[in-house]
Amino acid sequence: MQKVNYDIVTSIIFIIISIITILETRGLSKISYIFPRTIGVIFLLLSFMYLILSIIKRDNKKLFGNIDKQKVLIMSIGMIGYFISISLFGFLIASILYIGLITWYLQKDQKEKSHKSKILRAVLCSIIVSVSFFILFQYVFLVPLPTGLLG
Amino acid sequence: MLRKIYAIVMLVCGLFILASCSTSAGGSEAPEDFPSKSITYSLPFDPGGQSDVEARRQQPYLEEYLGEKIVIQYKPGGGGSVGWSELTNKDPDGYFFSGINIPHIILQPLANDDTGYKTEDIVPVAIFQATPIGIAVSKDSDINSLEDLVNKAKESPGTVTVSGSGTYTGHHIAFLQFQDIADIKMQYVPFDGASPSVQAFLGGNTEVLLGNSSDLLKYKDDMKILAIGSEKTFKPLSDVPTFKELGYDMTAGIDRGVAVPPGTNPEVIEILEKAFLKILDEPGVQDKMYEEGFEPKTMGHKESLEYIETKTEQYSRIIENVQ
Amino acid sequence: MFEVFPDIISSLIEPINILLLCVGVLAGIIVGALPGLTATMALALLLPFTFAMEADSSLITMGGLYIGGIYGGCISAILINTPGTPSAIATTFDGYPLAKKGKASHALITASISSGIGGVIGGLTLLFLTPVLAGWALNFGPPEYFWVALLGLAMIATLSAGSMLKGLIGGCIGLLLGTIGISPVGGESRFTFGFPELQSGLELIGILIAFFCIPEVISMIGNKAKSQKSLNKEKGIVKNLFFYIIKKPIFIIRSSFIGIITGIIPGAGGNVAALLSYDAAVRFSKDKKSFGKGKIEGVMAAETSNNAEVGGSLVPLLSLGIPGAPPAAIILGALMMQGITPGPNLMAEQPSLVYTFLVSFVIANVVMMIFGLMGSRYIGKVLSLPVYYLAPSIMFLTIIGAYAIRNNLLDVAMLIGFGLLAYVLKNAGFDPAPIVLGLILGPIAERGLAQSILMGEASGGIFTLFFTRPISVVLIILCFLSILLPLLGTIFKSKDKTEKEEDKIEMEA
């Protein structure tokens, strides 16, 4: 199987972004476009250089080599889920859920511990961290934390 | 000493008092009960600015009149547009109002399509403070009057540099208006705020400064103030003529007030309006404002609405000419 | 100063003022250490309370809070690679690698000592040289801002860990991200893609957290290798590090000087100061390669400079009434609420107040150093917590912090989006440092460029404006040197001595 050369893919994405940037500056006055357009052109040139170099010097290093992909994926999805649940349930509930679930999940390698103690740790950690910082921010720093659509 | 003890008690205990304040919403209620919980006074600018100074002055009076806590929050960004688009989307229950600046709320939607709010969605409660904009040159300049400046600009169009705060702002519109009336052409150099523009002017980077009255008062020994944009002679700078007195039919300034979201109950607006205007009758308040270089104003809800309307009409014409 | 000496002493030995000073510094450190909460925000929170205080107490508290807040940023920078305040961005470069090696307490102690020294030097400068330096700030016009930003951007050469090309591309990405929002001079909105919230541009602190912290947290759990090493315990490290630092006076003076000068220029903050100082440290060092891998000098350079900057940023405020940095703007607001309008005559009108403030400012720096040293022993232990507690809790803190900056959920969405992007980019060899550098310096460069063009159009000579003003010329020379020297350095290695001489002559000519 041909391994994907991420350098080539990245450089093509960059070229597309730089072209979009340059096109987006149309319709602005000179004082507003001069800087972004100049940078856009430099970006385009550099990306071309990057593309040419990566075609000449193909190395088949894999992106995300020595990494536990499952954990990274769960963590990323967890973050997005966290954001969605903040807007649904409000900050406090979303945080308790998020910290609890992730803490529980990350303990999966620890075979020597019982299920019960893992869950207990997760629950304790999530409630202590979320509630204490929630109080600190909401009432001491007077940050009006979101209450969510359903809250 | 007593005051100091009070201060420390405030510092240590204040946080706990605030902590005990409930934030739960009360739902809809009859306007005669208003207000029955704490009110948010939002400022669309960074803390420490002129709007903030005014809001902090009002805070204790408002709490006294309304009998509820006033919580000041900052929502800076986009020259105010972030805060004002939040305002127009808030519940119109009177528990959230925001500081407004004229001409900002008129000019921003005129200049850009994606500002996030419309001028007519901002319902003014009162306008209580203004900083007239004045025009000044360095004290070493060979320009001694507004007439000299106009003559110089006529001799060599486009070479006189004028620093001011921002584009599509009070300073910019004052610049455009003056250029239009005097039929001259100068170069406007916008800076990102009043302080940087004063700094650039004092450093000799521009020849002319458009400045807020409060700044002009602060640096009056370092510059010659040629004219000021107030309606009548501005008390703290009584020897400076107004544009009108010099034959240029214009006023220039930044007016500050507060506004509520569209759809707010008129009775609630009236309660707030009364509270804000009453502050200006308190002894010493107006003198203090003059001392700091501000002009007290006492425009209620209706008057402010009409004022914004006339200004909108006037400014759309000027902006159209530019664009 | 000496005629008001009795007033200063009597004000400073008031127990309440001593207490407020300590409380201010401590509160500042806590707020600074939490990502998303900045010195500016802490000062804004304090503002209503200062109203009830005497003018001197209020200034003393605010000064302490400001100093503590800038220092506190280094704690999260070292422990979790997240600058708690933008000023601590350069501290992450070597502080975090040190922590990874198990030397978190070394980094924290170094940061405390050098912050204290830098802060005291900044404070003393403020105390004695304010009137002299005030005029200097005014000589800084749009062209100079442009060149300072370019000088900062030249640092990409030092910061690109791997390939220079990728560093430059990263810089461009940062510069472009910095153009999102209303154009600083033209007033038109750009690249907002229909989101009104984007008009004010990307929130710097949020982006800093996204680019520095999130990739680290993800790697923390994703790396198959076993996590953090336990902390090394050593006796007498405070003493050893103190003498290590104090034995480098030129290094300290250089870093403080850069900090103070950057502070005096309104608009360039502690982040720019720390970055420039770090850059200078790398360039003057004989052992360039070890920077970025956990070198004590890297932390020293950044922390000395960003705390010296605090003193510098108050120079234009006290001498001209112009706030040099956002926290200074709040101190100005506090003074106005006390009925004091800072202007060119502040020092003449209120000498005892101003000098009390300045002396307390120097003392606050010492207090901060002591607190910092006491805390360093314990706070480093946070890292010995297991990853399954640490990772979700850090993520939670970054999210609450990103929201708190301006109470906007869109900032949280951006944090997550940019954080994931940064993780991918980092794995593809794009270091976050050049990107963030571009984001910080882009708006300064653009504003300077556009304003200079407008000024140049009026005077008819854009060229003269950019290339003949004295400070500009100095900055241009520095820019050229900083770009050419590394290039020449590589040439030196491959050529023999006689050719070296020629290069030097060419460069000077």
Image (cartoon, coloured by chain):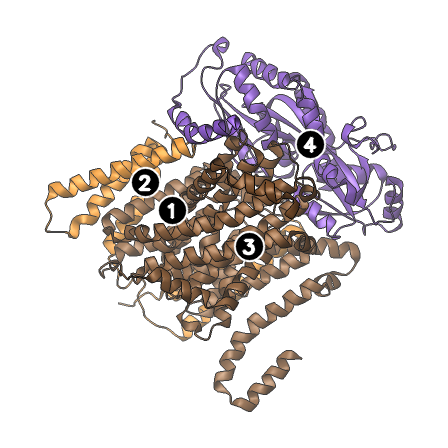
**CB under 8 Å between discs 1 and 2:** yes
Q: Residues within 10 Å of mark 2 (few under 14, many from 20)?
A: many
Place of residue C129 in the rendered image (x, y in percent of width and height, measured from the top left): 64, 55
Place of residue C375 in the rendered image (x, y in percent of width and height, measured from the top left): 35, 50
Hue of chain B? Answer: purple
The amino acid sitting under disc 4 is Glu
Left or right: residue C160 compared with residue C467: left
Cα separation, mark 2 vs mark 3, equals 43 Å
Cα separation, mark 4 vs mark 3, equals 31 Å
Whether residue C297 can be seen here = no
Q: Residues within 10 Å of mark 4 (few under 14, many from 20)?
A: many
Cα separation, mark 1 vs mark 4, equals 44 Å
Where is mark 3, residue-wise? C122
Q: Chain of mark 1?
A: C
Q: Residues within 10 Å of mark 1 (few under 14, many from 20)?
A: many
From the image, state whether disc 4 or disc 3 is nearer to you: 3
Place of residue B308 in the rendered image (x, y in percent of width and height, measured from the top left): 68, 25
Where is mark 4, residue-wise? B292
Left or right: residue A116 compared with residue B201: left
- Determine which quarter of the picture holds residue C107: bottom left
A137 or B292: nearer the viewer: B292
